[in-house]
């Protein structure tokens, strides 16, 4: 980041970060699946790419533009499905907190619904994997607080 806070955050200046930014550009009307899959391929190929991608995705989820957030949620889902434990292990509390915040509706109802769907999907996928308990624990915590998840 520049001295006065302007410019591109460091998370988006890595090779993966640049790709994440391009794939989640607010001018896109629909997900760019070739870019999303290229990002997944890089995550699976390079040792430092999962952490870089997770940080870049977290940064994009913080964007105020609802379309950027939506495209980032779609990219996040693609990474979770196509990169397995390689990416899931890089999924930390700060990234989960961003998804939880989106699920509260502060980035639009469409994004809230998508975030809730993803949290529920990840809980089911990793329910029995104690090393990735963040997914199931988050889901159960939200459910116990009365959060209503979409029907599967």
Image: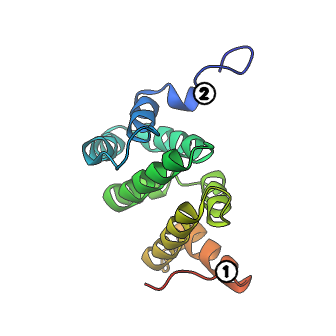
Residue 74 on image: x %, y %: 41, 56
Vertical arrangement, residue 107 with respect to residue 13, above or below: below
Image quarter of the C terminus = bottom left
Image quarter of the N terminus = top right
- The residue under label 2 is 9
Disc 1 secondary structure class:
loop
Vertical arrangement, residue 39 with respect to residue 129, above or below: above
Residue plotted at (47% across, 40% down):
26
Residue 6 on image: x %, y %: 67, 20
42 lies left or right of 147: left
- The residue under label 1 is 147
Q: Sequence-wise, which precedes: disc 1 or disc 2?
A: 2
Residue plotted at (32% across, 39% down):
42
Render colour scheme: rainbow
79 lies left or right of 109: left
The extreme left residue here reads: 34
Disc 2 secondary structure class:
loop
Residue 140 on image: x %, y %: 64, 81
Residue 88 on image: x %, y %: 46, 58
Q: Mark 1 packing: few (<14 Cα in 10 Å), some, or many (20+)?
A: some
In the rendered structure, are the residues bearing label 1 and label 2 in contact, judged by CB atoms less than 8 Å apart? no
Foreground pick, 81 / 23 = 23
| Mark 1 and mark 2: Cα distance apart in space | 33 Å
The extreme top residue here reads: 3
Foreground pick, 115 / 124 = 115
Q: Nearer the viewer, mark 1 or mark 2?
A: 1
């Amino acid at each position: 980041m520049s001295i006065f806070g302007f410019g591109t955050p460091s998370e988006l200046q890595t090779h993966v970060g640049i790709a994440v930014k391009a794939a989640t550009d607010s001018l896109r009307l629909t997900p760019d699946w070739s870019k999303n899959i290229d990002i997944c391929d890089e995550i699976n190929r390079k040792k430092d790419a999962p952490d870089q991608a997770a940080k870049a995705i977290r940064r994009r989820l913080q964007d105020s533009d609802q379309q950027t957030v939506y495209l980032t949620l779609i990219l996040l889902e693609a990474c979770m499905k196509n990169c397995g434990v390689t990416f899931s292990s890089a999924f930390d509390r700060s990234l989960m907190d961003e998804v939880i915040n989106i699920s509260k509706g502060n980035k639009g109802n469409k994004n809230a619904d998508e975030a809730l769907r993803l949290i529920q999907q990840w809980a089911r996928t990793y329910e029995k994997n104690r090393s990735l308990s963040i997914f199931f624990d988050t889901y159960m915590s939200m459910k116990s607080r009365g959060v209503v998840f979409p029907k599967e």
